[in-house]
Image: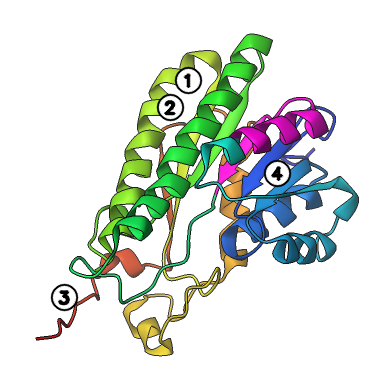
Amino acid sequence: MSLFSAPFDPATDTALVTGAGNGIGRAIAQALVGEGVRTVFADISAERVSAAISASAGPELAVPWVGDLARLDACDALLAASHAALGQVTHFVHSASPPRREADHALAVDHRTWQEMHAVNLDAGFHLAREIATRLITAKRPGSFLFLTSLHAGTPRNLPHYSTAKAGMAMLVKELAKTFGRHNIRVNALVPGAIAAGGFVADASLARHIPLGRLGEAKDLAPMALSVLSNKLAGYVTGAAFVVDGGLSLTNWFEAPVLEE
């Protein structure tokens, strides 16, 4: 049997993917059901969730959930719905993130936008991961978690609310990996580059900074995501960050923001 055949066990593996309505989260959730994994598609938009499930290879394996993860009660509702539908969540992918506006630089971003970005990326990610891990530990079951961070966890983006939230997530991955590892729960990060998906609209000229010569697409992330999530393929990998950027991180293309006088 090939090493790469059957990376998941449909009889025991289940998944929860946030931000599954569009972009990278959608691509990963669709790839999981394509491997026979029952998966909760969580997103803030009912329309996006419905479209993502309809376009997947295994819509009968998908469970829709709609809510705003900036709210703790919504996070708890997602956990309750996921456990009711799946019995136990063994694979968790946190891809949800509020939209970004280029105008929200350090002198312009408002308090609400700052708080929402951190609440969805960092607070929800921590709360969901800890609660899922607690249930896995009690059941003595292995698990695999994947957080979508960013190149801008370490490189300024002119969007301080976004960059600091992703930087916090990058360290959260390491903290959780260190704590949960003894319970056979792995926690890793996927670090996208310039991916033309999920609301990010890049100038095509950005491709000149990318060694592979093109902007990325959401589907470019799914194979790596599933490889890292799979306990069969990456069972000895935790606390790691996997960059999928076409080589973009070899350069820093952002200039300081233009400020109005």
Q: Nearer the viewer, residue 24 or 51?
A: 51
Which disc, if any, is residue 177? 2
- Between the residue at mark 3 and the residue at mark 1, the CA separation in whole angstroms equals 39 Å
- In the rendered structure, which disc, 4 or 1, sits on the residue that comes first in sequence? 4
Mark 4 = which residue? 4
* Crowd around label 3: few <14 · some 14–19 · many ≥20 (10 Å): few
Question: In the rendered structure, which segment of residues is drawn in magenta?
Answer: 76-94
Q: Residue at x 50, y 31 (%)?
A: 127
- Quarter of the image containing the N terminus? top right
Mark 3 = which residue? 256
- Between the residue at mark 4 and the residue at mark 3, the CA separation in whole angstroms equals 44 Å
Q: Secondary structure at mark 4?
A: loop
Q: Nearer the viewer, mark 4 or mark 1?
A: 1
Give the amino acid at mark 2: Ala
The answer to whether residue 5 is visible is no
Badge 3 vs badge 1, beta-carbon distance below 8 Å: no
Q: Is residue 80 magenta?
A: yes
Give the amino acid at mark 4: Phe
Which disc, if any, is residue 180? 1
157 in relation to 186, above or below: below
- In the rendered structure, which disc, 2 or 4, sits on the residue that comes first in sequence? 4
- Between the residue at mark 4 and the residue at mark 1, the CA separation in whole angstroms equals 26 Å
58 in relation to 16, above or below: below
- In the rendered structure, which disc, 3 or 2, sits on the residue that comes first in sequence? 2
Q: Nearer the viewer, mark 3 or mark 1?
A: 3
14 in relation to 180, above or below: below
Badge 1 vs badge 2, beta-carbon distance below 8 Å: yes
Q: Is residue 257 magenta?
A: no
* Crowd around label 4: few <14 · some 14–19 · many ≥20 (10 Å): few
